[in-house]
Amino acid sequence: MSDWVGESWGELTPDQQQRMNQLGDDVGKIWSDPDDQPTRDVALAAGLDYMLDRESVAVLAGDSMLETFGDTLASCRRDLQYALARCQIAAVLASEDGVPETRIAHEAGVDRMTVRKWLGKR
């Protein structure tokens, strides 16, 4: 873990270093797929930020780190909801234009059953 943390490792107390090692193990179990490496890195970076400075730069805006992360999460959920709505409507219109469900699914990056649900067939 010290290699991943880099120079900041020395800024951590021995207890924080132990906690960071445990966090590395826990994060590796939660996101264990090799493709999850970017997510593991983000999770570990959040843990490191938390341990180095609990209030971080967010305190300047009057928010705690958790409030800042929560605001980001809420914004991402809204963005996801809007992206799903755009994709669903495009799928419905494509289907009305005769595009096969399998092609819609492939191009939208979803499975065919999701397309069928969007089309009211499931």
Image (cartoon, rainbow, N blue to C red):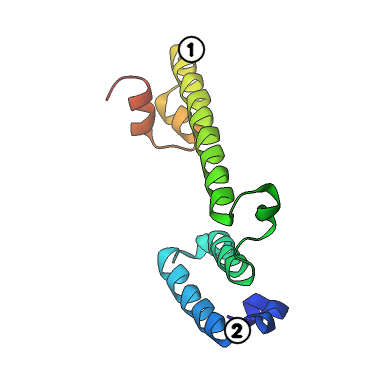
Q: In terms of image quadrants, where is residue 8?
A: bottom right
Q: Position of residue 10 (x, y in %)?
A: 68, 84
Residue that extends furthest to the bottom in the rendered view of this protein:
14
Give whichever of 56, 39 is nearer the camera. Answer: 56
Separation of disc 2 and disc 1 at Cα? 63 Å
Amino acid type, mark 1? Asp
- The residue under label 1 is 97
Q: Residue placed at 53% from the left, 64% from the top?
A: 40
Q: Position of residue 18 (x, y in %)?
A: 51, 84
In the rendered image, the vertical position of residue 63 relative to residue 119, given as above or below: below
Residue that extends furthest to the left in the rendered view of this protein:
122
Q: Position of residue 102 (x, y in %)?
A: 42, 30
Image quadrant for the C terminus? top left
Amino acid type, mark 2? Thr
Q: Position of residue 120 (x, y in %)?
A: 32, 19
Q: Residue placed at 56% from the left, 51% from the top?
A: 69
Q: In terms of image quadrants, where is residue 51?
A: bottom right
Q: Residue placed at 56% from the left, 43% from the top?
A: 71
In the rendered image, the vertical position of residue 11 relative to residue 73, given as above or below: below
Q: Residue placed at 62% from the left, 82% from the top?
A: 2
**Nearest to N terminus: mark 2 or mark 1:** 2
- The residue under label 2 is 13
